[in-house]
Amino acid sequence: MQSYTIYLIRHGAVAETNLGHYIGSTDVSLSEKGRQSLKAINEQLGYPYAERIYSSPLHRCTETCSVIYPGRTVQTVGALSECDFGEWEGKTAADLAGNAAFADWLQNSDKTPPPGGESGKQFASRVCKGFERIVKELSADNIRTAAIVTHGGVIMTILAMFGLPQAESYRWRMDNGYGFAVRVTPMLWMRDRVMEVFDTVPFAPAAGNDKSGEKEPQE
């Protein structure tokens, strides 16, 4: 049975996150610095070609797709959106200092949602179900390579739940514009719901080459 390769790529930088704001479901755009950084990464290393492109519907992800996979058709998937911080969207930890609900959330975010938002458990359930649907779709459509452009929290959740080697979510942190390549082997996936994390994305350049990762003609 053939395996499937999926590239999990974090969107480019946004100004609000760099300023320490909680930005989950808030639909902000890439910063100009974030956009230029993506262009530089693409020029220097090149993002690997994928037969199908999936994205969170939020602008910072769809805009990233337009930079790193220009001209390609992108399928947006709501389940790939970042965690919803509810009433705390756009606020900083300093803004919320002294808020008892915020203190409770910091102690147990898995079970305690922000007011009007998602708990960690609700977020993880949504993300994992969405990822499982994507894997099922790739198998049904015989798509062997796919890229998923999404958020850091989404990628960390997917890899903490399904990735081999097994690791806590914080160990799967990545910079904006970077991510991980995973290999889904049908037998292993169906039996144990696990997949191999085999490289980072973009790939490190091979000796003597300026770029790595084949880039086929785009749609």
Image: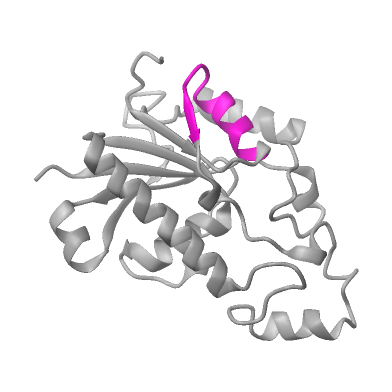
* Above/below status of 44 relative to 140: above
Q: Position of residue 78 (x, y in %)?
A: 55, 47
- Quadrant of the frame with the N terminus: top left
Seen at 66% across and 39% down, the residue is: 60
Q: Is residue 86 visible?
A: yes
- Numbered disc total: 0
Quadrant of res 41: top right
Magenta span includes 21: no
Seen at 26% across and 34% down, the residue is: 143
Seen at 35% across and 36% down, the residue is: 146
Seen at 46% across and 29% down, the residue is: 45
* Relative depth, front residue between 138 and 93: 138
- Quadrant of the frame with the C terminus: top left
* Above/below status of 161 relative to 33: below
* Relative depth, front residue between 204 and 175: 175
- Horizontal side of residue 203 vs 127, given as left or right: left
Q: Position of residue 202 (x, y in %)?
A: 43, 37
Q: Position of residue 197 (x, y in %)?
A: 32, 55
Q: Position of residue 144 (x, y in %)?
A: 24, 35
Q: Which residues are magenta?
A: 60-75
Q: Is residue 12 visible?
A: no
- Horizontal side of residue 32 vs 209, given as left or right: right
Q: How is the image coloured?
A: one colour
Quadrant of res 158: bottom left
